[in-house]
Amino acid sequence: MASAAFYLSVVGTILLALAFAAHVAHAVLLAAGRGIVALVPSPAPAFAGVVTGSFVERETSATDGSERDRTAIASVAWGLAVGAAAALGLALVLRGAVVGRGPWGNLYEFTVAFAFGIALGYVVLAARYPIRSLGAIPLGIALALALYAFSLPSQVEALVPALQNPPLLTIHVGFAMIAYGIFAMSFAAGVGYLVQGRDDRFAWLPSHRTLDEVAYRSVVVGFPIFATMIVLGSWWASIAWSSWWGWDPKETAALVTWLVYAVYLHARNLRGWSGRPAALILVVGFAMVLVTYSGNLWFSGLHAYSGLN
């Protein structure tokens, strides 16, 4: 099953590459004004002028731009993204069945899981919000990670004693995979917001309200998951290394990452820091996610065990 898992990850990577290319083509067609909606404007919602307040804002953000997000290649791009996420997910399931724990005990496994987390995060959010014109950003990151994974040793090996705690390994690193994938989506929305601006410069991009909503919802979900991951990691450190916190490079980077997203949640609710400044914080936040992911590639530390970075 290990070889089957590997070949499935190859299939998933190929589908990611095709999905990325299709999403780029989709965005180019939209930017060229070849989306369907430019010809058929969407009617106003039934509640327009009757209902106001948060309900209207929420419904508007959920539907705003959905008709602008369609081209001839849109359904193909979406299907490829779903297929890529499914193939990578199945590859992880088979790998987990082989190793008897969460399939992220070394850098190869976690890199594939990271790519899967991003692809899954995109599929889930794009099913709810009209953000497929930005799909090339998260899918491009996922593709880069999946390709990088193939440069790493993929053979199944026994973990060192410090990592031989299947429940904590599965949950702690699994939470990191989920949080990283969600934060990648907040990054994509943040970049989109910086390009779009409050004036909605480009008709083919999601509105600034939609982008702000996606970014905020992503962090609201990802932040407590990431915080739980840090707490579980501290508990595991006390078991494996007899110390709750050792200022290991990966621990320190994770703490800084948590603080950046805490600042974002606070700043977004301040009038002077909402909008562009908040979006910039999301870019910094995901840069810190990448530092947390790769920290022990640059600095020696306890998390270098089994290549788990």
Image: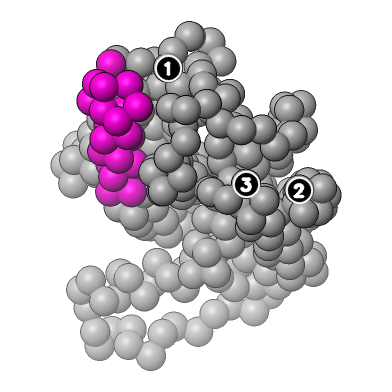
The quadrant in which residue 279 appears is: top left
Residue under numbered circle 2: 2
Residue under numbered circle 1: 302
Q: What stretch is highlighted in magenta?
A: 223-246
The answer to whether marks 1 and 2 mark residues whose Cβ atoms lie closer than 8 Å is: no
Query: Which secondary structure dominates the residues rendered in magenta?
Result: helix
Question: Where residue 180 sits in the image (x, y, percent)?
Answer: 47, 42
Residue at x 44% of width, y 13% of height: 301
Q: Which of 113 and 284 is in front in this view?
A: 113
Kindly identify the amino acid type of the residue bearing the numbered disc 2: Ala
Residue at x 39% of width, y 15% of height: 249
Q: Nearer the viewer, residue 127 or 152?
A: 152
Query: Where does the N terminus fall, quadrant-wise?
Result: bottom right
Judge left or right: residue 42 versus residue 144.
Answer: left
Q: Is mark 2 on a helix, strand or loop?
A: helix
Question: Where residue 280 sits in the image (x, y, percent)?
Answer: 38, 32
Residue at x 52% of width, y 55% of height: 121
On residue 99, the disc is 3
Q: Nearer the viewer, residue 94 or 152?
A: 94
Q: What element carries label 3?
A: helix
Q: Is residue 265 shown above or below 241? A: below
Q: Which of 236 and 124 is in front in this view?
A: 236
Kindly identify the amino acid type of the residue bearing the numbered disc 1: Leu
Q: Does the magenta stretch include residue 241?
A: yes
Residue 20 visible in the shown view: yes
